[in-house]
Image (tube, grey):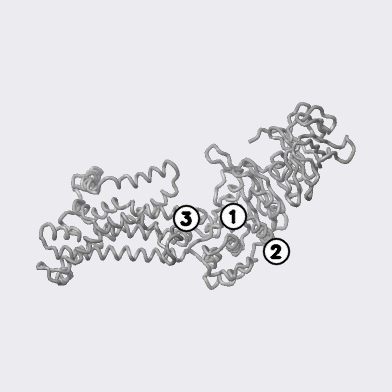
Amino acid sequence: MNTRPPQGECGMYLDVKGITKSYRDNTVLDKLDFSVLKGELVSLLGPSGCGKTTLLRMVAGLVSADSGTIRLAEREVTTLPAHRRNVSVVFQNYALFPHLNVRENVGFGLSARGMTKAQQKVPVEEALALVRMEQYADRPISALSGGQQQRVAVARALVVAPDLLLLDEPFSALDRKLRETMQVELKALLRSRGITAVFVTHDQEEALAVSDRIAVMNAGRIEQYGGPMDLYSKPATSFVLDFVGMSMRLAGTVKSAEGRLLRISTAYGDITAPGNFIAGARVLVGVRPELISPGLPQGSPEATNRVTATLSDVMCLGAKTLIYGAASGDDCLVCEESGAYAIGLPSAGSPVTFGWRVEDTLVYPAEHRQ
Amino acid sequence: MSHAAAKTASPAGRTRDPFLLLAVPSLLLLGMLFALPIAFLLLKSFRDADGALSVAGYIAFFSDPYMLTALRRTIVIAFETTLLTLVLGYPTAFALARARGFVQTCILIAMILPLSVGVIVKAFAWSIVFRSDGVINKTLLGLGIIDEPLRLLFTETALVIGAANIFLPFMVLPIYAVIRQINPNLGPAAATLGAGPFFRFFRVTLPLTLPGVVAGAAFVFSMAVSMYVIPNLIVGERSQMLSMLIARSFLYLRDEQMGSTMSAVLLVIAAMIVIASSIILKRLSGRQA
């Protein structure tokens, strides 16, 4: 299983350049660039229809590109058909062959490469052991649970020693508990085998859990590509702010700009924020909820922002408590406290103040909601 | 809900599924108009003209070379018809499954609408096409491909083509129904595992569509083996099929024993096909269960 062609240590392992794909008038991918290093676990994260699955199928060779190039492991594969790319895919519903048993499913790729049943025996057993499914080798697929089917799909994809593993929403068919277990397990497995893998998902928690880097996609483009912490603490666009993690979001207008400090008026009072906008610009202000505290913040008034609203809801989620203020339009007033903070808090309907540091305030140009 | 309630309401140990009652009207109809007459027919094949028990009818049938030729011809024509509908219908079923929206509706209508036109009308249409001054001959003559009209009508080739045309939907629809059940990602999954088009077809597509093929073949064969109107109109008296000999026995020769005997033989052939296909289908689904 470790017979992989030798790779150059530097340079991009998977390199997608200038890919465009349209169906009639609908541009699904728009001059998109995307690259993955060898051994990296990467997620394509985005809402449905953002083009992430099209990109995955294109890398697999199942969809052709209108323009652009795809290079994988030092060779150009743009026009190579799927069965000659050596790219394995774990499909959303696993796509196991219902007329074959577990062993035959895992051995399928080896059969396709001309190996006899006898030659397949050892690698198939190894792959099944890898996903702890040895004792199910002779079961029909219909006798397996969702989690077991996923393991078989992973074993089937890995047994052929692919140059790249693609996973299309691999956990979406599993219930929450099992999903978390499988994420940890799969990540450890891929790491230990040094597999380069690209996950496609619409679930930001999943992307944060399994990947080294995440490419957030929207409308056929990559909005931001970076590590989980970068995406969360420094969202490049308001889309990333909105899609990755929770946030307080306020629409506002820049009243004045002094150096790099902006004075912004919102429906709940004026605030100060760092940024580069001209006076009069319509902006979106965002703050991560755990950086906000209910009540007056610590520190000098110049270095802090505060807005006051009516308390609308308190949600105790166990490890954290969310406190919501009544907001108008698309605004969202929320702050997060660790633990069961709700005890002793004023009840809904009473006024509440949200406070946070100026330097934690993110400002984006206002966009029309999609 | 009512299902469970009915079960618990019945006395212990005697659970009856009330849904079986829904089939009673059609079972009655089948029993009165199909099973009973068939039973009478089978009985009759074992009675001579005086009403005494005898297997003379079967001995006469299986020792008459003319009858055996007709039997063989009937089976061969039914087989060829099945094969032709399979060759034409299999790709059609894929096209139908792959097509979307308007195109799919058009193909489906094209498949189903002809079923509502009587067989006799279609068979007449074929005889017009196949005639020596029919469309095919006129076209071929006009193009200079042939010098004199081909004999098309009254040939077994024309019969097979005509029958295949009429039975095509019964092959396409079961295969189409099976294709629709297949996960569309199986082909891509096989491809990404390194399987080329041929490997994919023979290891994935064909085994998964086999149940539809078996069902369609059983449909078409059992209908083709007993067809009467189509051979009558396309081939006529020249090459007799069993069904035509049965009609002749009953209507003209008044030989009820021979007629019943041939009917019984035909029935056994059709029954064997249906039973064999259901056994194969069970095997196939057993492997996937």
Q: Are marks 1 and 2 on the same chain?
A: yes
Q: Is residue A113 visible?
A: no
Question: In this figure, which residue is indicated by the disc labeled 1?
Answer: A173
Q: Which corner quadrant holds the C terminus of chain A?
A: top right
Alpha carbon of mark 1 to alpha carbon of mark 3: how far?
A: 18 Å
Q: Is residue A319 visible?
A: yes
Question: In this figure, which residue is indicated by the disc labeled 2?
Answer: A192
Of residue A160 and residue A106, the one placed in the foreground of this image is: A106
Left or right: A200 in relation to A335: left
Left or right: B5 in relation to A110: left
Q: Earlier in the sequence, mark 1 or mark 2?
A: 1
In the image, residue A224 sits, relative to residue A306, either above or below, namely below
What amino acid type should be assigned to the residue bearing mark 2? Ser
10 Å crowding of disc 1: few (<14), some (14-19), many (20+) = some
Q: Pointers 3 and 2 in contact (CB under 8 A)?
A: no
In the image, residue B94 sits, relative to residue A234, either above or below, namely below
Closer to viewer: mark 3 or mark 2: 3
In the image, residue A366 sits, relative to residue B285, either above or below, namely above
Alpha carbon of mark 3 to alpha carbon of mark 2: how far?
A: 35 Å
Q: Chain of mark 2?
A: A
What amino acid type should be assigned to the residue bearing mark 1? Ala
Closer to viewer: mark 1 or mark 3: 1
What amino acid type should be assigned to the residue bearing mark 3? Ile
Q: Residue at x 53, y 73 (%)?
A: A118
Q: Pointers 1 and 2 in contact (CB under 8 A)?
A: no
Query: Horizontal and vertical percent for residue B182?
Result: 47, 55
Of residue B52 and residue A109, the one placed in the foreground of this image is: B52
| Residue furthest right in the image | A300
Question: In this figure, which residue is indicated by the disc labeled 3?
Answer: B182
Tell me the SS state at disc 1: loop
Tell me the SS state at disc 3: loop
